[in-house]
Image: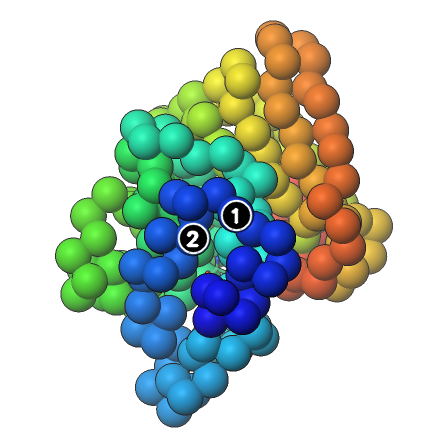
C-alpha cells in the first residue's frame, strides 16, 4: 500500500511513510471489509461515515508537518485510523467525534493496539477543544463551509490547520492554514478532495 499508493503520489516524508507502514489499517475497518483494507479507497465504517483513503491520510499528515512532541487536534475520529497514524509521529492526539458509537469503537481499537497517546472525545469538533489548546496542528477529516473560528483561536503560533473547505456539502478543496502571529494566517490550497460534511455549530447544519 505504501509503495503503490503513497510513495507514487509524491509523499516522501520518512516519518509519514514509517507511520503508514506501522499502523495496521485492517484493524480499523469492519471485519467483512478487511480484504479491501489496503486498497486505495475510503471504506464504510457505520453511521454513514467512512475511513479516509490511505493516500489522503498520508498527504494530510505530511502537510500538517507533525513533529515529535506536537499536540494535535484531530476532528472527525471516525475509525480512529488517522489519529493513530498522527500519534505515531506526534506527542499526543486529541481526537473528537460527534457519533457516540464511533467514539466507542475507536477507543476499543486504539486500546487493543496499545496506542495510548490518543484521547478520543465525544462532541462537536467545530468548537475545537479549548481544554487542551493550543494545538501545533489541527487536522479535519470532514469538510466545512469555513474555517471554524475556534480552530484559529486554539492554534499555536506556527501551528498548522489542514482541512477540506468548500461551499458544497461533498466537494471541497484541501487547504492548509499556518498561523504566523496573533492575527495573521497564511492559506494555501492542496487540491480538490471529497470528504463527508463537517456537521456542527460552526459547520454545516445537521
Ligand atoms: N479520520 C477518520 C475519518 C472519518 S470520516 C478515519 O480515519 O477513519 C469523518 C468523521 O467526521 C465522521 O466520523 C463524522 O461523524 C465526523 N464529524 C463530522 N462532523 C463532525 C464534528 N462537527 N465534530 C466531530 N466529528 C465530526
Quick one: SS at disc 1? loop
The span from disc 2 to disc 1 (Cα, nearest Å) is: 7 Å
Q: Which residue is mark 1?
A: 12
Q: Is the residue under label 1 in contact with that under label 2 (CB below 8 Å)?
A: yes
Tag of residue 46: none
Count of marks overlaid on the render: 2
Q: Position of residue 82 (x, y in %)?
A: 43, 55
Residue at point 35%, 61% (across, down):
21
Q: Position of residue 123 (x, y in %)?
A: 44, 48
Question: What residue is shown at x 40% (from left), y 58% (from top)?
Answer: 20
> Which residue lies at the image location 56% right of the left edge and 51% below the top edge?
11
Q: Secondary structure at mark 2?
A: helix
**194 with respect to 39 (left or right):** right
Image side of residue 161 versus residue 77, left or right: right
Q: How crowded is the residue under tag 1: few (<14 C-alpha within 10 Å), some, or many (20+)? A: some
The mark nearer the N terminus, 2 or 1, is 1
In the rendering, at what x and y percent does residue 151 appear? Answer: 57, 30
118 and 90: which is toward the camera: 90
Left or right placement of residue 136 versus residue 110 in this view? right
Which mark, residue 17?
Answer: 2
Q: How is the image coloured?
A: rainbow
Quarter assignment of residue 129 = top left
Q: Can you see residue 205? A: no
Q: Is residue 145 visible?
A: yes
Which quadrant: the C terminus?
bottom right
Q: Residues within 10 Å of mark 2 (few under 14, many from 20)?
A: some
Residue 10 vs residue 170, the one in the foreground = 10
Task: Please report the residue visible at 34 percent of the width from the left and 37 percent of the height from the top.
Answer: 90
Up the image or down, 123 lies above or below 105; here it is above
Instruction: Name, please, the residue furthest toward the bottom.
Output: 32
Q: Position of residue 71 (x, y in %)?
A: 37, 30
Which is nearer the eye, 106 or 175? 175
Amino acid at each position: 500500500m505504501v509503495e503503490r499508493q503513497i510513495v507514487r503520489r509524491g509523499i516522501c516524508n520518512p516519518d509519514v511513510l514509517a507511520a503508514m507502514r506501522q499502523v495496521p489499517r485492517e484493524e480499523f475497518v469492519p471485519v467483512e471489509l478487511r480484504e479491501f483494507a489496503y486498497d486505495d479507497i475510503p471504506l464504510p465504517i457505520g453511521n454513514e461515515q467512512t475511513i479516509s483513503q490511505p493516500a489522503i491520510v498520508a498527504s494530510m499528515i505530511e502537510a500538517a508537518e507533525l513533529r515529535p512532541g506536537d499536540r494535535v487536534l484531530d476532528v472527525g475520529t471516525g475509525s480512529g485510523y488517522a489519529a493513530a497514524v498522527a500519534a505515531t509521529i506526534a506527542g499526543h492526539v486529541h481526537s473528537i467525534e460527534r457519533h457516540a458509537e464511533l467514539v466507542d469503537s475507536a477507543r476499543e481499537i486504539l486500546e487493543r493496539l496499545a496506542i495510548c497517546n490518543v484521547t478520543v472525545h465525544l462532541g462537536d469538533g467545530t468548537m475545537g477543544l479549548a481544554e487542551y489548546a493550543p494545538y501545533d496542528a489541527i487536522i479535519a477529516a470532514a469538510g466545512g463551509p469555513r474555517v471554524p473560528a475556534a480552530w484559529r483561536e486554539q492554534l499555536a503560533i506556527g501551528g498548522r490547520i489542514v482541512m477540506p473547505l468548500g461551499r458544497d456539502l461533498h466537494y471541497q478543496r484541501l487547504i492548509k492554514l499556518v498561523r504566523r502571529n496573533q492575527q495573521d494566517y497564511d492559506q494555501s490550497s492542496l487540491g480538490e478532495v471529497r470528504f463527508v460534511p463537517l456537521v456542527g455549530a460552526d459547520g454545516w447544519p445537521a
